[in-house]
Image (tube, rainbow, N blue to C red):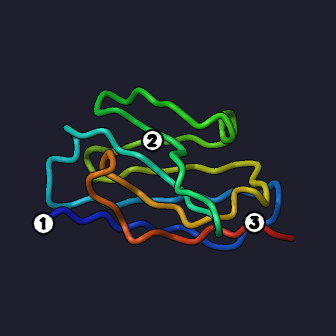
Amino acid sequence: QVQLVESGGGLAQPGGSLRLSCAASGFTFSGYPMNWYRQAPGKQRELVADITSFGKTTYADSVKGRFTISRDNARNTVYLQMNNLKPDDTAVYYCSRRGDYWGQGTQVTVSS
């Protein structure tokens, strides 16, 4: 069965960095686009970044220039490198296979 397992969340200071990982299994990872979403308390879940099976990337305006999505098809893993973090980045971050399967989420808290 399809499984997506996120890791790498935690507490960071404003201006700091975190790297999220999502290990995928149960499907042919290289053939699917992958997403990172986030949901802050009291807000709707929003798309943060997308990467196609060919490696083309798109980002939400709020994270452009600060976040980078990448994938390693040999490791069946998608990453989200988050730099220059802001308190507004505080949320639960979810890995998704284009919205049909989801991980359990990993908490990111940005605070001094």
> Residue at 66% across / 34% down in the picture?
61
Q: Please, is residue 11 above or below residue 67 in the view?
A: below
On residue 1, the disc is 1
> Residue at 37% across / 30% down in the picture?
55
The x and y percentages for residue 59 are: 56, 35
- Residue on which the image places disc 2: 70
Amino acid residing under circle 1: Gln
For label 3, the crowd category at 10 Å Cα-Cα, with few meaning under 14, some 14 to 19 and many 20 or more, is many
> Residue at 45% across / 41% down in the picture?
70
Q: Please, is residue 30 above or below residue 39 in the view?
A: above
Q: Dots 3 and 1: beta carbons under 8 Å?
A: no
N-terminal-most mark, 3 or 1: 1
Q: Number of numbered discs present?
A: 3
- Residue on which the image places disc 3: 110
Farthest right residue? Answer: 112
N-terminal-most mark, 1 or 2: 1
Q: How far apart are marks 2 and 3 (CA)?
A: 22 Å
Residue in front for this viewpoint, 88 or 74: 88
Classify residue 43 by image quadrant.
bottom right
Q: Quadrant of the N terminus?
A: bottom left
The x and y percentages for residue 56 are: 41, 26
